[in-house]
Amino acid sequence: MNRLRQGWHILRYFGPRWVAYRAWLAAQQRLGRLERTLPLRSWNDEPLAGHLIAEADPDPEALLERLRRRRRFFFTWTDRPQFREWLSYWDCGSTGSAPSVQMAERIAAGDWCFFAHHWAHTSLPPDWHRNWQSGERVPSNLHWSRIDEFAHGDIKWVWEPSRFTPVYALVRAYWRTGDERWPELFWRLIEDWRAANPPQHGVNWKCGQEIALRIIAWTFGLFGFLEAEATTAMRAAQLVEMLAVSAERIERHLGYALSQRNNHGICEAVGLWTVGLVVPQLDRAAHWRALGRRHLESLAEELIYEDGSFTQHSVNYHRVMLDGYAWALRLGEVCEEPLADATRERIQEAVKWLFELVDLSSGRAPNYGSNDGSWLLPLSNGEYDDYRAVIQAGSWLTGGQRWLAPGPWDEHLFWLAGAEAIEGEPDPPERKDWSAPVGGYYLVRSDQGLAFTRFARLRDRPAQADFLHVDLWWRGVNLALDPGTFSYHQAAPWDNALGRTSVHNTVTVAGQDQMEQVSRFLWLPWMSGWVATARRSDLGDLALWEAEHDGYTRLVKGAVHGRALVQLGERGWLVLDRVAGPPPARLHWLLCDAPHEFNAAQGRLGLELEAGPVWVQTGTTGVAGAKAETTLVRADPASTRGWWSPRYGLKLPALSLALEVQAQEAGFWTLFTWEPMQVSMADDVMCVRGADWEAQVRLAWADRPGPLVRAVTLRDAREDTLTVAA
């Protein structure tokens, strides 16, 4: 895309005010203004007394006494007997010591957990400026504005230790055992980080969101260890000083975070809100509280859509947003400064959004959108990809009612709100077919699974080029899955490559993405989509959902991709595609890794899963005489094909099934069933026959524009029909 067109699209989507601000900000950085506004300093230049209100006693002993005497946090030391009883209950199924204690032991041995899965033997404390993947070291003596975060490998491997995520495990282990090693380890890490990161020195001061996540972890550690022997008055005073300097850094550069219209602004507002509430003796505490409140309330309205969708178009970033707001809502209540009811209501809609997507038996959800390993509040024994804890906490904090049955995920809510929150019977909303049309998310449910897809008329920048991607779940298994992210910055072919259309479960035209990737996190021009049909039959056995998108019209006029999802009762799913544009047309499915048999000539793949056998069959229609080829690839060592990334920095094998046809107009069909099927086509009727059932689908391939499906009939124990009006 040439620069003129790119500039026009940026102006069109983001507006002149945004463009002018980002240009001004870039100029300020080049001219060194950021360095003059927030100059390099030492901690001696930032004495605590200089950050306190005039009437506050600067004596560290007095400060520590005030922190202990006034309840400005979720829990106090007097709650510990009650906590130990509940914590031991949630650990009762663990092998050996509690998971939090096991993690604390590993940290004490010099291991560090990156992105909730990758343990590396670093050092104790770790080198806070080292990239633990590449081994490179980022300069620690430069002002943060002078450091290119992409010049030393994937910067997230540098930032991850400075998020202080292990603090949550240390506090949880301490409240279980009373072992004084854990608060001592916390303070040792704090003191070393302080020595290695003077104010504004190095890359750990570069990103305000990283600073905010650190503020939250430090605050949890401060109050979790407030009565420990290792918590001296001097240590507490130094940490309060670090919180004040961190909040000041966020405030001075907050406009950049807000301009991104995502979790950066929310997290930084949570950071300001936190420091302003828990240490009211700071001279700017009232200002930070007001600033944090203003942006938390306005961002909830701006970035969370009316249907609960979130601007970042990502399941995991949705959790980051919910965790941040859960912390902010509860902290405001404890400090008797609650956020607005309208904010609480908007957050509740976002909780409902996630509740609809999650498989309640495992807590997993579609691996949709960017997934960078962020986990703001790991406060239970659940795994990283178990979203039940944030749903349970969010439902109670926004509506006073738990939506999930009791389980170990309740510990998360318990830390925030105490025993009162986990009493009483849960009252979950009913789950049926579901849509969030503003954000563009759609679910068609069966008793044993669901089909998930997404597309919309975009309000905010897309994270990936993946419109009409389909996730299929069956008996708790993510059968057709999203590839995830792996890394934002790696050598080719892995440089943020899993956002591309070709690795998603959709159709590509001429080997092109649905949009052009003009920078690491920017796709242009933004595409649009529209729903043609969404209905269920009178008996409820059949469901049909159809939509189209215009992503390929930039290649040639009329190059529209239409897709239909057909639920054939509990017998299976049929996915139909119609596409026009420059050849080749390619249908792709990324499937879970499992023992399999593949017949390329028949386009049939058999999978052996623990939940039972699955057959996947593909074919074409309307392309008589055109060359077609079906291929299956698992974990291609030379490309991104046949891989998926459930967690950041981790890639695992998957099965990549592709059907490619050399035609300007093509129709594809894909059938997912739990037994082998006989598929036949006569004129415009597709017939699917099983051992004791039959489905007939009347197609409308040639009617462009128009629906793909005219009618569906399912005959098994009873006959059900779904008809679409012409």
Image (cartoon, rainbow, N blue to C red):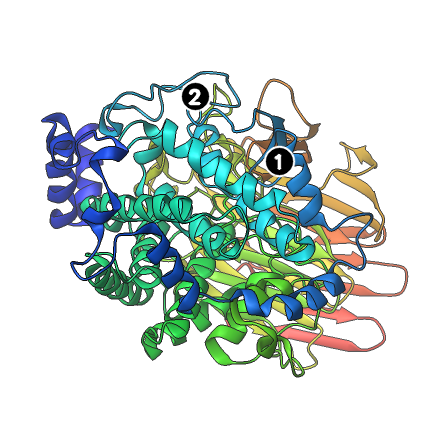
Residue 596, horizontal then vertical, whole percent:
82, 36
Image quadrant where residue 444 sits: bottom right
Mark 2 burial class by Cα count in 10 Å: few <14, some 14-19, many 20+: many
Say left or right for 313 vs 607. left
Q: Is residue 664 visible?
A: no
Q: Are marks 2 and 1 in contact (CB under 8 Å)?
A: no
Q: Which callout, 2 or 1, points to the residue nearer the camera? A: 1
Residue picked out by circle 2: 153
Above or below residue 4? Residue 469 is below
Residue drawn at 23 percent across, 39 percent down: 46
Above or below residue 48? Residue 82 is below
Please state which amino acid type lies under the numbered disc 1.
Ile
Say left or right for 220 vs 292. right
Residue drawn at 48 percent across, 29 percent down: 157
Above or below residue 66? Residue 21 is above
Q: Is residue 554 visible?
A: yes
Identify which residue, 698 or 177, lies in the foreground.
Answer: 177
Residue picked out by circle 1: 107
Give how far apart the Cα atoms at labels 2 and 1 are: 24 Å
Residue 491, horizontal then vertical, whole percent:
47, 19
Please state which amino acid type lies under the numbered disc 2.
Gly
- Kind of element beneath mark 2: loop
Q: Quadrant of the N terminus?
A: top left
Question: Which of disc 1 and disc 2 is earlier in sequence?
Answer: 1
Mark 1 burial class by Cα count in 10 Å: few <14, some 14-19, many 20+: many
Residue 640, horizontal then vertical, whole percent:
57, 27
Residue 468, horizontal then vertical, whole percent:
50, 51
Residue drawn at 37 percent across, 51 percent down: 263
Residue drawn at 50 percent across, 16 percent down: 135
